Amino acid sequence: MKVKICGITCLEDALAAAEAGADALGFNFAEEAKGKGRYIDPGEARNIAEQLPPFVVTVAVTVNEDPERVREYLEFMDRVQLHGEETPEACGQFGPRAIKAFRVGPGFNPERMLEYPVGAYLLDAFVPDQRGGTGTTCDWDMARCARALAGPLILAGGLTPENVAEAVRAVGPYAVVTAGGVEREPGKKDHERVRSFIHNAKTSLSG
């Protein structure tokens, strides 16, 4: 089970998550993340990325970003997570390095995912006027149906150390993501909760 800790804003939290076994770290470059304290300047993210240990994947989280800017991010980030209303054509420019996010709510059709030529799909909860980071749990039944259609599938939405094992068993995703579920305050991680989340996710299918 792969684990991504998102909303990283400082080197201390990045290194703590990596030491705890995180497979990927998310850096939010979308302006709307400022309201939740999870925005980080791309230059600061680049500096953090250069100090990470090997084999930790870095992900730029964007919302309806200009493609040229996304290409700039991919000069120092491993992947880009497209969390807006990007078209299949726009996402296809970045191929396997792109992760397309979908909000599971009214009108969501899992077959839409197949239109996007990307490396992975992320499912998050639907909350009006918010794109991720809501703390609301995704519809796990719908997520399980989507996983059967396309993959790799990444599950997000309201995941915490307390419910991540249940989510993994219910959906069977390729990876799970959390941001607010392991925070001690907006934008800052609780390192003990980070360790618990990663441990619970990675041992959820043992035994």
Image (cartoon, rainbow, N blue to C red):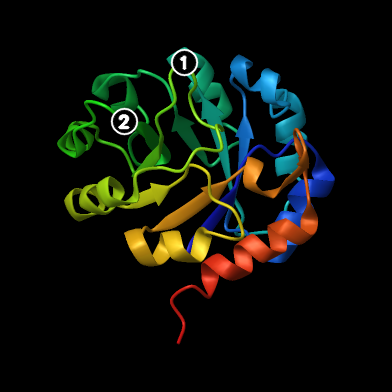
Residue 152 coordinates in the image, percent (x, y): 32, 52
Which element is circle 2 on? loop
Residue at (62%, 15%) from the top-left corner?
31
Q: Name which of mark 2 and mark 1 comes first in the sequence.
A: 2
In depth, the one of 133 and 153 nearer the eye is: 133
Is residue 12 among the parts visible in the rendering?
yes
Tell me if label 2 and label 1 are in contact, CB under 8 Å: no
Residue 85 coordinates in the image, percent (x, y): 35, 18
Residue denoted by label 2: 105
In depth, the one of 6 and 182 nearer the eye is: 182
Residue 166 coordinates in the image, percent (x, y): 45, 64
In the visual, does 81 lie left or right of 60?
left
Q: Amino acid at mark 1?
A: Asp
Which element is circle 1 on? loop
Residue 129 disc label: 1
Neighbor class of circle 1 (other Cα within 10 Å; few <14, some 14-19, many 20+) is few
Is residue 51 among the parts visible in the rendering?
no
Q: Quadrant of residue 17?
A: bottom right
Residue at (31%, 38%) from the top-left corner?
118
Residue 200 coordinates in the image, percent (x, y): 58, 69
Neighbor class of circle 2 (other Cα within 10 Å; few <14, some 14-19, many 20+) is some
In the visual, does 197 lie left or right of 52?
left
**Quadrant location of the C terminus in the rendered image:** bottom left
Label 2 and label 1: CA atoms lie apart by 12 Å
57, above or below 195, in the image: above
Q: Amino acid at mark 2?
A: Gly
Residue at (54%, 57%) from the top-left corner?
3
